């Protein structure tokens, strides 16, 4: 069974960089898009960006200037770095797997809450 | 506001049928996926591509999609079905390729 587990600091100060890791176990990295999705308090889910197993990336236009997503295939880890965070970046961050653009996200992590506050 | 509109909440008694809608202009031309999320747990895919049930999902969960509305139907609702449910589509014309509904909280009375 594929499992995804997010980890990272629960509290980040404004203007600093938010860094998260997603560890994949029980399955292959190859052939999939590995995505970050977030949900701010009281709001809906928002796709953040993805890294394809080849290393290609695509980011939400609203975050593109501050975001880097990478994949370490040897460690089966996906990473997210979001720079210059504000309170608007406070959210539960999920990692999830998807095979193709029309496919569903078939496996998700439990999510990790990140709060941006001084 | 969200591209996909869901009712914030739906309440149903045990044993009854719950219907959760996901509305967008011409959503019937798209492939809709539905997820269930319980507190502190990873979201679980319950219906894919409008009507398909992933392995391990009870047949009580079904989906339909036509016109401007996609619907998740849960028959013979159980207490364990209480969760948030959200829909998702691929938006080919959007800067964000994957778009989600705002989510619906299903309460089992």
Image: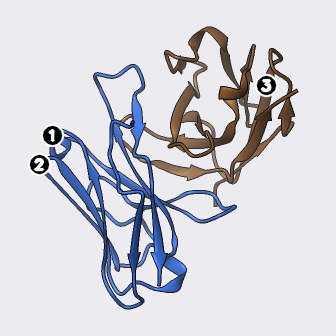
Task: Specify the label residue A18 is tagged with.
Answer: 3
| Dot 3 crowding, Cα within 10 Å, few <14, some 14–19, many 20+ | many
| Dot 1 crowding, Cα within 10 Å, few <14, some 14–19, many 20+ | few
Question: Mark 2 — on which chain does it sit?
Answer: B
Question: Mark 1 — on which chain does it sit?
Answer: B
Between disc 1 and disc 2, whose residue precedes? 1
Task: Specify the label residue B26 is tagged with.
Answer: 1
Question: Mark 3 — on which chain does it sit?
Answer: A
Residue A115 lies, in percent from the top left, at 78, 36
Rendered residue at 70%/34% (across/down) = A90
Residue farthest toward the bottom in the current orientation of the protein: B15
Q: Which residue is mark 2?
A: B67
Residue B32 lies, in percent from the top left, at 30, 49
Instruction: Specify whether disc 3 shares its chain with disc 1.
Output: no
The chain drawn in blue is B
The chain drawn in brown is A
């Amino acid at each position: 069974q594929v499992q995804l587990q997010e980890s990272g600091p629960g509290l980040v100060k404004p203007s600093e960089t938010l860094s998260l890791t997603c560890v994949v176990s029980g399955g292959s990295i190859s052939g999939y898009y590995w995505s970050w999705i977030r949900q701010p308090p009281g709001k809906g889910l928002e796709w953040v960006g993805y890294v394809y197993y080849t290393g290609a990336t695509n980011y939400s236009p609203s975050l593109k200037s501050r975001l880097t997503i990478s994949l370490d295939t040897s460690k089966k880890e996906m990473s997210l770095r979001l720079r210059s965070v504000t309170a608007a970046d406070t959210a539960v961050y999920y990692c999830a797997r998807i095979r193709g653009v029309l496919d569903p996200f078939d496996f998700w992590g439990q999510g990790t809450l990140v709060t941006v506050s001084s | 506001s969200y591209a996909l509109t869901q009712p914030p909440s739906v309440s149903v008694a045990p044993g009854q049928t719950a219907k959760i809608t996901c509305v967008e202009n011409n959503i019937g031309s798209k492939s809709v996926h539905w997820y269930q999320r319980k507190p502190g747990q990873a979201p679980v895919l319950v219906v894919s591509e409008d009507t398909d049930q992933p392995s391990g999902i009870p047949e009580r969960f079904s989906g339909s999609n036509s016109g401007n509305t996609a619907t998740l139907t849960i028959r013979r609702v159980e207490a364990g079905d209480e969760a948030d449910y959200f829909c998702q589509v691929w938006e080919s014309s959007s800067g964000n390729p994957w778009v989600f509904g705002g989510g619906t909280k299903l309460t089992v009375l």
